[in-house]
Image (cartoon, rainbow, N blue to C red):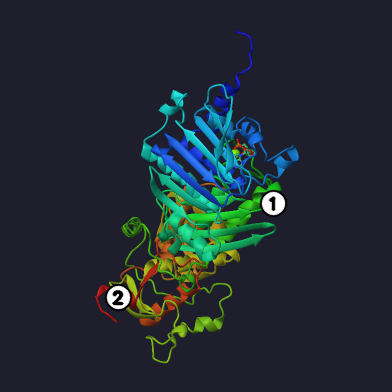
Amino acid sequence: MTRIQRLSPRLANQIAAGEVVERPASVVKEVLENSLDAGATRVDIDIEAAGCKLIRIRDNGSGIDPEDLPLALSRHATSKIASLDDLERVGSLGFRGEALASIGSVSRLTLTSNHRDGTSEGCSALCEGREMDVQLRPAPHPRGTTVEVRDLFFNTPARRKFLRTEKTEFNHLEEVVKRLALSRFDVGFTLRHNGKVIHSLAGAGSDAERQRRVAAVCGPAFMEQALFIEVERGDMRLWGWLGLPTFSRSQADLQYFFVNGRVIRDKLVAHAVKQAYRDVLYHGRHPAFVLFLELDPAQVDVNVHPGKHEVRFRDSRAVHQCIFSGLHRALADVRPAAAPTPLTTAEGLAVNTATGEIASQPGLGWGAPAAYHPTSAPLPGQSGEQLRSYAGLHPRVLSEAQTPEEVPPLGYALAQLKGIYILAENAEGLVLVDMHAAHERITYERLKAARALDAIPGQPLLVPEAIAVSEREVALAQEHADVFARLGLLVEVAGEESLLVRQIPVTLRGSDVAALVRDVLSDLAEYGSSDRIEAHMDDILSTMACHGSVRANRRLSVPEMNALLRDMEETERSGQCNHGRPTWTRMSLEELDKLFLRGR
Ligand code: ADP
Ligand code: MG
């Protein structure tokens, strides 16, 4: 064994750099965070060769006292915390005091700063990655700081080898800038790459300006299809923009979550968001969101990871509950009346082609006529009066007597197309509804609401129906008789390989009884244990809802169609079907006029 020796400062810093400085994007993150911590209101970022050649970031923040410049570049030196107490309630983005030292150990770093107003006499410190000794010289600079990082990893070839193409590295870097630009609306940012302006974002003070920034960073399509939410719960505040379920993505690439201004990736947060979208998102798709959680800094531990993109919540349950319930509530309100924009998708193709998938789902029993029973199982809170109005009392077409405000959001049915779509007319123009998808959602929400009251009302069958099943299915039906009962199903064992169905949920009357029971049995078999069945109750209800829904190719009368439209307006989450596809869309008269090149 060789003897123990102390690491040189340079080597110690380079080891630390291994954690903090992974790629040009990480340098940009650390340096920008310093600018924000210094109270800058303007930050200019100049990049060459994706940051491998040059990263120059200039801010108009507080600046650094020339005497402190060498300290700023040395490890374990910070102006942001002084005691363990401070660490428990960190308000700044930085606090570890090692970023500049780490960066300086693997690049040629110049730090130029001026901490006084009214003079342009600044001071510059150079750190060349060799011995970590810092040379100071006067340099002109307005109040604020410029950090220039050249030739990143010039002395650590192993690291350099891990760098990807210029395009990939720049994408990472741009992503960092976007995140920080979303975290601080009040700060102006410009990003230039190889002399070309990529982003120029003015400081945003008003709501409209903030929306403009989100649109600039996340794309205008996101902004057009996002809900603004703001929830307070105890001393927590959650606000931001939530992509409508129909604006889903094939990747989780448009998800920004900030905790006290710090962008984080967190399992707990991801889980809460996923739960909230569970019921409304097409399988395998990812929601888009920009959300800000604000809470007492003492409630968050930010000292979990050197990159500081993970946090630990002291009361993780409360945080989970706040996010889940806030989002769940907001998404539940996505129904025609509340949706100001048409529910078309940003990646329309992915969703449209999916219609075929659903149609070919086994056991759906297409074509079996199922009457539409709008009044069958009222949702809690629906008044009898409201329900009576479904009985065809609505005017069937828009009459002159109605003012636009009196016309319901989905208007009145005109006709049915190919047994699949309802065409309706509202105050703005044409409304198109996928009747099966819409009804499926309504049925599903009814079943859920009834289950929440612990009673899915059943309706005895006039003639009990015997169905042939396997022995295993008979055993399953026996074992889970209580589950069946709670689902509004009464199923008896009639033989070794047969069951007798005596009752099905009222909401599902008219559906194919055998197919319904078989599908529920197959769900029970799939989920296996009682625990998992409980956890997947909603999935089972969703399976059942398929059966109660009006089938394609079934003719609906105009009063039936109008009743369906009114139900959609009343039903939570009715903007999407159970599989997350849109249930309706619309075309305004203006859009139709444009289509036909008709000037008005
Ligand atoms: P930390 O941010 O964790 O304190 P850094 O190594 O990133 O550690 O920075 C060290 C110190 O240098 C900071 O605490 C701060 O006082 C000073 N500093 C760095 N960048 C700036 C800046 N842009 N403006 C003002 N001060 C800065
Ligand atoms: Mg820092």
Image coordinates for residue 311, horizontal then vertical, percent: 61, 43
N-terminal of the pair, mark 1 or mark 2, is: 1
Q: Nearer the viewer, residue 62 or 48?
A: 62
Residue behind mark 1: 296
Image coordinates for residue 150, horizontal then vertical, percent: 46, 33
User: In the rendered view, does 373 fall on the left or right side of 531?
Assistant: left
Position of residue 128 relative to residue 519, above or below, is above
Instruction: Determine if residue 580 is in view.
Output: no
Image coordinates for residue 445, horizontal then vertical, percent: 50, 66
Quadrant housing residue 222: bottom left
Q: Circle 2 sits in a helix, a strand or a loop, which is it?
A: helix
Q: Which residue is pictured at 33% across the width and 60% down the height?
A: 352
Residue behind mark 2: 592
Quadrant housing residue 80: top right
Judge: label 2 CB < 8 Å from ligand 1: no
Position of residue 306 relative to residue 546, above or below, is above
Quadrant housing residue 370: bottom left
Query: Which of the image's four quarters has the C terminus?
Result: bottom left
Image coordinates for residue 209, horizontal then vertical, percent: 50, 62
